[in-house]
Image: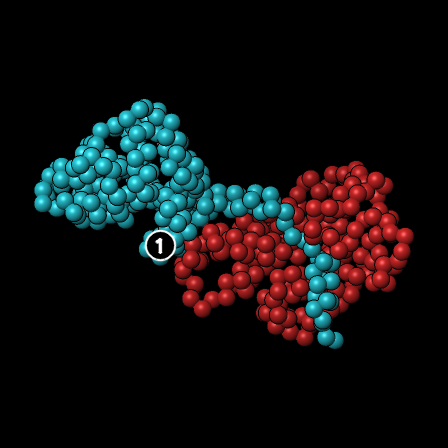
Chain colours: A red, B cyan
Amino acid sequence: MEPFERVVARHGRTVWRVCRAVLDEHDADDAWSETFVAALVAYPSLPPTTNLEAWLVTVAHRKAIDVLRARERHPRPVETVPEPPPAPPHDEAFARTDELDAALRGLPPGQRRAVVYHHLVGLSHREVAEVTGISADAARRASADGIAALRRLLRDPDAAPPAGASPAAGRGRVATRTSTPTPTPEPKGVR
Amino acid sequence: MTATPADADATRDLLAGLDPADGHLAALHARFAASALDAGAVDVAYRTLDSPVGRLLVCATDVGVLRVAFELEGHDAVLDRLAATVSPRVVEAPSRLDDAARELDEYFRGERRSFDLPLDRRLSKGFQLTVLEHLPDIGYGSTASYAAVALASGSPRAVRAVGTACATNPLPVVVPCHRVVRSDGTAGNYRGGMAAKQTLIDLEAHA
């Protein structure tokens, strides 16, 4: 077996996506750490044929649900304090992340998990079904419905760029959508 | 409904904000390593540190320091062997090695003459263990010949075996096999290469 450290390096992002599909950022931190501690304990006794990624997704999903349930029983006190509205973001990457986060949170939990596990984690619909305890057809439908709903929620993100926003140079993850207002309509026809 | 590769790319772009930033992953890892140590789930903890003989890999079990490795040995290859022979629960958990890192730093600055660290000797057995346990008798800044070490180890004819024992010392620097040299005064073989051995001998001679 390879050193566990390499498992963490290879699958850390995937586990994060699973945790974030279920939880907000703060709670996802808890679930991420707990997932890898639990995986480390079990690691030496895994059968050699184990699909590590699928196994970690299952562990992460369960840990995230555990954290979610614990949070529902004991809400963080800080969450009850009303916060001032956030300042308009100047960094499009962060703006997009917040926007996406809000949109994902607007999906029913089943759709959200199906979207993230299939499209971001890379599980097949059948594997999504196994992890979340629904049928493969239901997983396929939830993923398709979730993507459609996300597109509706995120429609036309360029409509109102924040004043003084600069192109998100160097932040490659949003490189396909620039914040620079363009005089010509985009070819995708999303406007 | 068939998804084209372009659709898949578009979906990936749509969801890209859900990835952690690199700095965040490092913070998550630090937290995981601390929890894993607390839970007693880390069998081999490791860290790396810079030194005058290159980047060193230092590994420890809960017994003590298990392995010190030079870059020349290939740190990944060393970790692979530890995973196979000791335990696959190998985690970069630097805090277990705080004392070792501090003492090594002091040694390389010429401020420390002997190490006061618990050692895990499980990677050495039999005659090698006997030889390595005698090495701290060679004082800081001095050297001994392979033949002299063989004599001290109770097997005066086992000069070649002493050479092998030193050349495969799992705890170089901390267990001072670099102080064992050829009878003609040249440095002789070393896990970290002959230049590294000479560097350590010179460091001790001038400190």
Q: Where is residue B15, by image quadrant?
A: bottom right
Residue A23 visible (yes or no) = no
Direction right: furthest residue: A183
Q: Is residue B108 visible?
A: yes
Q: Position of B114 compared to A159: left or right?
A: left
With B70 as the anchor, is A156 left or right in this view? right
* Identity of the residue drawn at 43% across and 63% down: A46
Q: Please give the name of the residue rendered at 77% of the width and 60% of the height, measured from the top-left corner.
A: A150
Q: Nearer the viewer, residue A121 or A165?
A: A165
Label 1 lies in what chain? B
Q: Position of residue A100 (x, y in %)?
A: 74, 53
Q: Pick the quarter of the image with the N terminus of chain B.
A: bottom right
| Amino acid on which disc 1 is placed | Arg
Q: Which quarter shows the C terminus of chain B?
A: top left
Image height check: is B8 above or below B2? above
* Tag 1 residue: B81
